[in-house]
Amino acid sequence: QELKDTGVVCNYVLQSPNTPSPFTYVIVDQKGSTRTCIHTPASEELTPEEISADMLKGCEWVHLDGRHTPAAIRLAELANDLGITVSLDAERDRPGLNQLLQRADILFTNSKYPYIFRENDEP
């Protein structure tokens, strides 16, 4: 209800009875310019079949984090088809992430992630 009260459209929020929502704690170390995320995942994966183009009506930007990768790929495909900007927060390799990377217009990452694609350790 709090999200709705601030103007966030929640028409496509999927709910499953007796299933806790995933959440992430973010711990920021400003001195060391680092952050740590402690994530508690959902017990059910979001599937590509649950994604529809209607979800993107009125959207200008879609931001993804690589979780629920098959569903994220479907959402990115639809966004690409509709000319909607897609950003991706990628910090580690996940199955299917290469497909998602190909559909992202903007990539947010840490300083180490790009080096996993290099053939040697030199920056």
Image (spheres, rainbow, N blue to C red):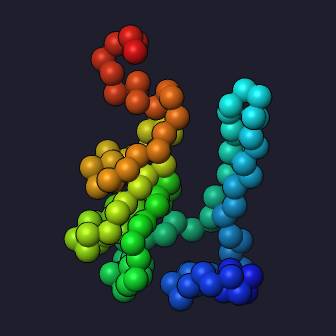
User: Visible in this render: residue 66?
Assistant: no
Q: Nearer the viewer, residue 8 or 114?
A: 8
Q: Residue at x 41, y 55 (%)?
A: 87
The answer to which image quadrant residue 78 occupies is bottom left
On screen, residue 31 versus residue 114, left or right, reads: right
Report the residue that reaches farthest toward the left: 81
The x and y percentages for residue 60 are 39, 72
**For the point 66% across and 64% down, which residue is it?**
22
Q: Position of residue 108 (x, y in %)?
A: 47, 44
> In the image shown, does 113 or 33 lie closer to the viewer?
33
Q: Is residue 103 visible?
A: yes
Kindly indicate the quadrant of the structure image that contains residue 14: bottom right
In the rendered view of the protein, which quadrant contains the N terminus?
A: bottom right
Q: Name which residue lies at 48% across and 39% down.
A: 109
The residue depicted at 68 percent of the width and 51 percent of the height is: 39
- Does residue 52 lie above or below 122 as drawn? below
**Horizontal and vertical percent position of residue 105:** 32, 53
Which of the 4 image quarters holds residue 23? Answer: bottom right
